[in-house]
Image: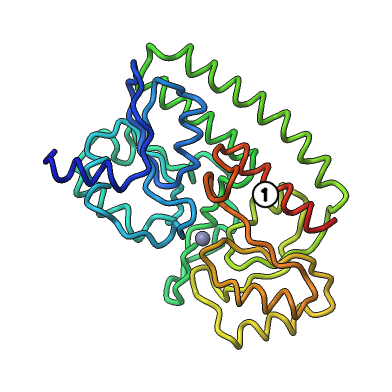
Amino acid sequence: MSRMLAALSVASSLSFPASAGATVKVVTTIPDFAQLAREVGGDRVTTVSFVSPTQDPHFVDARPSFAVDLADADLLIYAGAELEAGWLPPLLRTAGNAGIMPGETGHLNVATVVPLKDTPPGAVDRSQGDVHPLGNPHTWIDPRNGLRIAIAITSRLKALDPDGTDAYETGLRDFARRLGDKMKEWKDLLAPYAGTKVVVYHKSWIYFLEWAGLVEAGTIEPLPGVPAADSDLTALADRLSGNGVRLVIGESYYPSDSLGFVAEQLGATELTLPAMTGGATGCDTYIDLIDHDVHAVVDALQ
Ligand SMILES: [Zn+2]
């Protein structure tokens, strides 16, 4: 790698420093997968993630450093179901790393290890700009899926680094125990609000909402990835008026004036929530992220 590209790589990616004995270089699109890899792999892995936690993961500007990171990665983890379709495939081609190409142990497409929602019943219509044509890619924000993803990562790390098998199994067990304890706590907190209706900006919360017992009553975007026009906002508010919607949820990168307008029209509370690890203060781990979002929802409903 050239010195310039190496410098770019260090400067622009969210990387965690290699520690002594690290053997597996994990490169991920969103930071959640990197954090889960660190939960399992500890100091046997180094991680780099491309997407900032406050950035729309559908629309990322690919930097030259990303291809450099991919070129010497041992394991690529990405959401799949076309979340990264606009920017990851050309990087993979540029990187030319056979070990992380589809079908290889070093290629982990998360959409293949969790049950996908919103999968289309028939032929896919891409003409309207829907960025979820193969199903909903925002799988990670349900803690049951967080565990599924951690299990899949463990299996890949064991295959890539058999000497670390005991360490990876211990890391997974420890993560699963801590997550399981928190899941009981979260379910108790959420139980009084079962069935509460919620509007979301982008259809990125269905996994979380379904796990939490909340109901998605509508989306502000007319189709995933298609920004709402003023007419969409008023039509949605008219349609849901009097329906008892209590929350209007969106990530920080969506227009808060749209969230605020719909919330005001519906007499609901506007709630900006991080959807990725690191997306808000105190959300530095995957468990902290879910914890933050559960408490934010409960606080808003109390
Ligand atoms: Zn999406």
Using the image, determine if residue 134 lies above or below residue 285. below
Q: Is mark 1 within 8 Å of ligand 1?
A: no
**Residue projecting furthest to the left:** 2
Identify the residue at image location x=22%, y=39%: 71
Left or right? Give the position of 99 relative to 138: left
Coordinates of residue 42 in the picture (x, y in percent)? 46, 22
Q: Nearer the viewer, residue 203 or 116?
A: 203
> Which quarter of the image is occupied by the N terminus?
top left
Identify the residue at image location x=54%, y=16%: 170
Q: Which residue is mark 1?
A: 293
Figure coloring: rainbow
Coordinates of residue 8 in the picture (x, y in percent)? 22, 46
**Residue projecting furthest to the bottom:** 231
Quarter of the view holding residue 247:
bottom right
Left or right? Give the position of 42 relative to 181: left
Badge 1 crowding class, 10 Å Cα cut-off, few under 14, some 14 to 19, many 20 or more, is many
Identify the residue at image location x=13%, y=40%: 3
Q: Amino acid at mark 1?
A: Asp
Coordinates of residue 206 in the picture (x, y in percent)? 65, 56
**Residue projecting furthest to the front:** 281
